[in-house]
Structure formats: structure tokens, C-alpha cells
Image: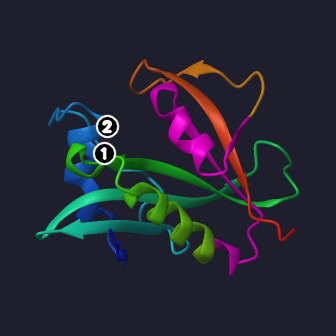
Amino acid sequence: MTFLVQQHADATDLHELRRRILRNNDPAISVHDSRDLDDDAIHLSIVRDELVVVCGSLYSSHSPLDDAVASYQLRYMAADESVRGSGGGRALLERAGDIVRTRGVEHLWANARDSALGFYLATGWTTVSGSEHLSKETQLPHTVVVKSLRKK
């Protein structure tokens, strides 16, 4: 299956999927990030039948491994159940890496839900030892994961 990853100027295009998948569709929970409107924020999605089915946002950030390394944080990575396992998430992460690599970024990182660690490990990310924690927002177990974008 081929996926077209779109870049959005406005994160509100992604709010419905963020809320439905990541916040149990609770309308009382905000899915806005204070960095959504930053000039260097990147909002990506895959759309099927006019609905966002995969999304993720990237924000300029310090690397959890080395403050001196140019880095972006991935947040709000979500995939609709109808497309999980079909390669859409992988396509979005590859596009995200391509975009930030052109900005001189060497690391992507995320606070990954432990239930999604297999996905991140399968797409070339590594866990940061000792970074396991409960998310303040969801109270679910998370682990920090990092993807090196350095050319080998």
C-alpha cells in the first residue's frame, strides 16, 4: 500500500485523530500543544477518504541524549485502527526524518507509549535506558525513544 504523507500548516487538522486515539475521544481533554503554532513546528498526516488516519507533530527540542545535538521531539503520533500495521506509521516517520534532516537535525525523540515500543523499535528507534515513566497526561507507561538521523 502506498501512503502520501501531507504537511499541514495548522495542527487543528490533526486534533480529531489526536483526541480519538490518544485521549479516549474525551472532548474535555485538550489536544493542543503550546508549540503547535511555532514557526518551526511540523504537522504531518496521511488522509484516506478525507479523514486523517495517521498523524504526528514535530517540535524543535533538546535531545534527551546530548543537549548539543540538534533535535526534534515527535508528539501526538497516532494511527486509526483501520490502518495499523499497514505501513502508514512507518511512512510518516520516514517523511518526518527526511524533513528534519534537511534542517540539520541529528536526533528525533519521543515519549513513546510502552504499548507502541515494538513499532518504534521495528522502525529503527532505540530506547533510552532508565527513561521509563508514567505520562502526566494519560497516566500510561512511557519510555523515551530516539532515532539517530546521522549519516553512516
Q: Badge 1: how crowded within 10 Å, few (<14), some, or many (20+)?
A: many
Residue located 42% across and 49% down the image: 77
Residue located 19% across and 52% down the image: 16
Q: Is residue 22 left or right of residue 28?
A: right
Taking 43 as reference, is 148 above or below it?
A: above
Q: Which residues are magenta?
A: 100-127
Return the residue nearer the eye: 85 or 73: 85
Q: Residue 66 location, x and y as percent?
A: 86, 48
One can see residue 8 in this view: no
Taking 128 as reference, is 64 above or below it?
A: below
Identify the disc placed on residue 23: none
Q: Residue 112 location, x and y as percent?
A: 54, 36
Quadrant position of the N terminus in the picture: bottom left
One can see residue 6 in this view: yes
Q: Is residue 129 left or right of residue 14?
A: right
- Residue projecting furthest to the left: 49
For badge 1, the amino acid type reads: Val
Quadrant position of the C terminus in the picture: bottom right
Name the image quarter holding residue 86: bottom left
Name the residue beneath numbered marker 1. Answer: 31
Q: Is residue 103 left or right of residue 133?
A: right
**Residue 109 colored magenta?**
yes
Per the model, the C-alpha gap separating discs 1 and 2 is 9 Å
**Residue 147 colored magenta?**
no
Q: Residue 62 location, x and y as percent?
A: 74, 52
For badge 2, the amino acid type reads: Leu
Q: Are marks 1 and 2 in contact (CB under 8 Å)?
A: yes
Mark 1 vs 2, N-terminal side: 2
Q: Residue 78 location, x and y as percent?
A: 35, 47
Name the residue beneath numbered marker 2. Answer: 22
